[in-house]
Amino acid sequence: MKQIQNNSEDFDSLIDSKHKNQLGFDIPENYFATAKQEILTRTLQHKHKQKNKSKQLIIRLSIAASVMLIILSGVFVWKHHTNNTTISEVQISNQLLSSNFNNSILFNSLFIEDDKISEYFTENITHYIISEELNTPNNNLFLNSLFVNDADLESYTLEILTL
Amino acid sequence: MNEQEKIILQKLLHPNLKEKAFEELLEMYQKKLYWYIRKIVLTHDDANDVLQNTFIRIFNNIESFKGKSSLKTWIYTIAHNEAIRYISQKKIHVSLHDISNQYMNTLKQDVFFDGEKLSETFHTVLSQLSEKQRIIFNLKYFDDLTFNEMAEILSINENTIKSTYYNTVKIIESQITL
């Protein structure tokens, strides 16, 4: 190792004199010592800069990821809510269509003029609702009550409750 | 790769020993690389800049060294590329026929150039060579690299390097006595 070092020192002094004498290249005094220190300082600074850059990148990515997560969660909740609403609306429409409600009433209503729609509604839809109510046994009690005199209403109610 | 290189490389790849090993590497190659770079960029200030950039690059990229070549030639390749990149940036506004003049002008502007008769004659001859001839001659004559090492650094066939070197020596000898 010492031999290598000696050879290296010999080569260094030879290389210096060769460049100085034949090419006229001078260097400032103590250049290599100061340059070594400068390089070491710059390398460490560069290393710290790189570390800071990496840290900043990680922080930025974390923030971006968090924002994306929040947005995605928001979109997911909103979508879920919208789907539920849509389902409930669809369910209501389906229930209406699948019920015994006469589709022709709805269909015919399309051809009724605006000023006559109220009359049409009273005639057809109210009748439909009343007939539906009449077909439901428990509701008969309520419907019958409409035809009981006010004076007899209390005894009618007691009669029903005892049943 | 010789034993000394293997030991220093192992240290350089070890996170806790890297900085210390880098200091050793700097000690080993600082002068050699400085002179090599100086002959390409010519002025001291430019050589100093390129030398610093070279070592920063070495420090940052040592993990990517695969050991396919020797550590020495890998380091010289980085220095060579840095120096060439540096002068290419500076040559942007110079026409090709002015290169020889530019060589001498750059040299004379440097306060750290001692323009004695011999050195000035030497540089005049060198300035008339092509960049390839000049680099090959410098690497052998001044930096004492083997033809094999030069082939690795410059990515040129070893025989081409040999013939270019001997032809260049003949050209120079015809004008000055080495």
Image (cartoon, coloured by chain):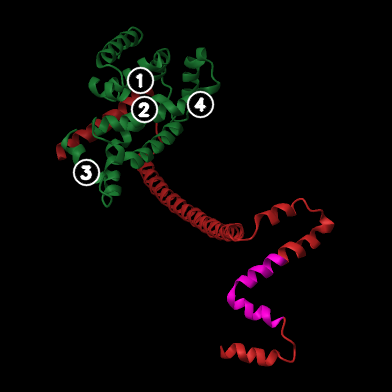
- From the image, tell me which residue sits under label 1: B135
**Amino acid tagged 3:** Gln
First to last magenta residue range:
A127-146
- Residue B80, numbered label: 2
- Which marked residue is nearer to the observer: mark 2 or mark 3? 3
Disc 3 sits on a residue from what chain?
Answer: B
Magenta span has A129?
yes
Residue at screen point 30% across, 38% down: B64
| Chain identity for the colour green used in the image | B
| Extreme-right residue of the structure | A115
**Amino acid tagged 2:** His
Alpha carbon distance from label 4 to label 3: 37 Å
Q: Locate residue A40, reporting x and y percent.
A: 36, 46
> Pointers 2 and 4 in contact (CB under 8 A)?
no
> Pointers 2 and 1 in contact (CB under 8 A)?
yes
**Amino acid tagged 1:** Ile
Characterize the local packing of mark 4: few (<14), some (14-19) or many (20 or more) Cα atoms within 10 angstroms.
few
- Residue A149, numbered label: none
Q: Locate residue A68, reporting x and y percent.
A: 51, 54
Alpha carbon distance from label 2 to label 3: 24 Å
> Pointers 2 and 3 in contact (CB under 8 A)?
no
Relative to B15, is A120 on the left or the right?
Answer: right
N-term mark: 2 or 3:
3
Q: Main secondary structure of the magenta part?
A: helix
- From the image, tell me which residue sits under label 3: B10
Q: Quadrant where the C terminus of chain B lies? A: top left
- From the image, tell me which residue sits under label 4: B90
Q: Is any atom of residue A25 visible in this view? A: no
